[in-house]
Image (spheres, helix red, strand yellow):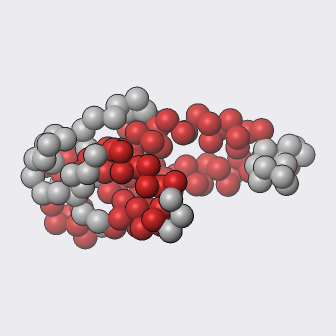
Amino acid sequence: MNCLQLYVQAWKKAFVFQGRARRTEYVCFNVLNLVVMIVLMIVDGTFGMFSEEMGMGAFSMLFSLAALIPSISVSVRRLHDMNFTGLWLLVSFVPLLNLILALALIFAPGSPGANRFGPDPRAAGGASAEDDRSA
């Protein structure tokens, strides 16, 4: 799957908090969300809707609200891939620990084989374990 397909897949699984998400799905979702936010901020600025106090405008705010649940969902599934419960996402509210969690979600490999949250998504996706670990 390419990055855009993984992005769409994450949106389709917006309310799925069970199962596992590969690193590539997590990274593609967040990078493409960042790209969309930057484009929407430019659009907001072009139409004079950018607010300095909030750091965003109407379009970028609506998108960020719409992307909140899918973002939480893909993060929880990514934690499941690492064999952690989704409650670890609460660490993101603690300064400095949130950076460690973000780096772990991006760089730490998922647990090989099936774990308590489901089968290995690398095996289900047809890619080998080495492909995802090298990505």
Q: Position of residue 30 (x, y in %)?
A: 49, 53
Q: How many marks?
A: 0
Q: Position of residue 102 (x, y in %)?
A: 43, 62
Q: Residue furthest front?
A: 94
Looking at the image, which residue is at 67% across and 54% down?
A: 38
The quarter holding residue 132 reads: bottom left
Residue at left offset 62%, top offset 42%: 64
Residue ID at (83%, 48%) = 50
**Observer able to see residue 41:** yes
Left or right: 25 with respect to 84? right
Q: Position of residue 13 (x, y in %)?
A: 38, 33
**Left or right for 61, reference 66:** right
Tell me if residue 134 comes above or below residue 74 in the rendering.
below
Q: Is residue 39 above or below residue 58?
A: below
Going 54% across and 39% down the picture, which residue do you hit?
A: 68
Residue 126: tell me if it is visible. Answer: no
Going by the image, does 113 lie left or right of 101? left
